[in-house]
Image (tube, rainbow, N blue to C red):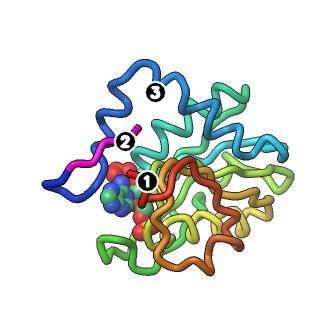
Amino acid sequence: MRDRNDEWRSANETGWWRDPEVLASLGPALADQFSDTHPTVVLGLQSRGCLLGSLVAQHLGLGLIEVRKDPARSAASDRLWQRTTPPDYEDRHLTLGFRRNLINSGDRALLVDDWIATGAQALACQGLVADAGATWLGASVIVDSLERPELRRPLNLRSLLHVREL
Ligand SMILES: O=P(O)(O)OC[C@H]1O[C@H](OP(=O)(O)OP(=O)(O)O)[C@H](O)[C@@H]1O
Ligand SMILES: Nc1ncnc2[nH]cnc12
């Protein structure tokens, strides 16, 4: 998994997906970080989070909710749970959301993503789960690059690697 791309000062994540063994291991590894919980649904953040979220959901025998950027393009806003993020790692205030009928108040939601930096997008996802009256279990990510360590506990963040290990 060590794959530093010096030009961009970030990991070359597409190389991870290209490796069949790494790809096969990611769903189980991300799921196992929350083996003490009982998720009923996986949330995947567009776009890399969806790629990984589907691996985790399939491993656990669960379904996936695609958390879309700019979800109002695909459904009327009164049918959506939507939240706007604080500034993310690219200083964007993104609107994230999904259709309300995809989740119910009895759901126990696990967010899956490749990377966390400011935590802005994960916080918005936590807010979406709260809006639906569902239970937030935590965020299972590959790389922890969290800039605000005080968010680690409220988000219940668990990671396969810290950015310093890349
Ligand atoms: O902690 P934050 O500052 O919120 O940033 C982390 C998020 O940003 C990246 O996705 P990006 O929006 O670049 O989309 P992508 O998955 O399409 O690359 C990354 O995959 C996380 O989803
Ligand atoms: N995928 C990613 N998401 C957020 N911050 C990053 N920095 C480097 N890669 C990143």
Which span is picked out in magenta?
Answer: 1-5
User: Against 152, is 87 above or below?
Assistant: below
Taking the spot 39% from the left edge, 73% from the top edge, the residue there is 88
Which residue is found at the position 63% from the left and 71% from the top?
A: 152
Q: Earlier in the sequence, mark 3 or mark 1?
A: 3
Name the outermost residue toward the left: 7
Mark 3 or 1, which is nearer the eye? 1
Cα distance, mark 3 to mark 1?
17 Å
Q: Residue at x 29, y 71 (%)?
A: 90
The residue singled out by tag 2 in the image is: 2
- The residue under label 2 is which amino acid type? Arg
Give the CA distance from mark 2 to mark 1: 8 Å
The residue beneath circle 1 is: 165
Q: Earlier in the sequence, mark 3 or mark 2?
A: 2
Location of residue 146 in the rendering, given as x and y in whole percent from the top left corner: 49, 69
**Callout 2 touching callout 1 (CB < 8 Å):** yes
Q: Of circles 3 and 2, which is in front?
A: 2
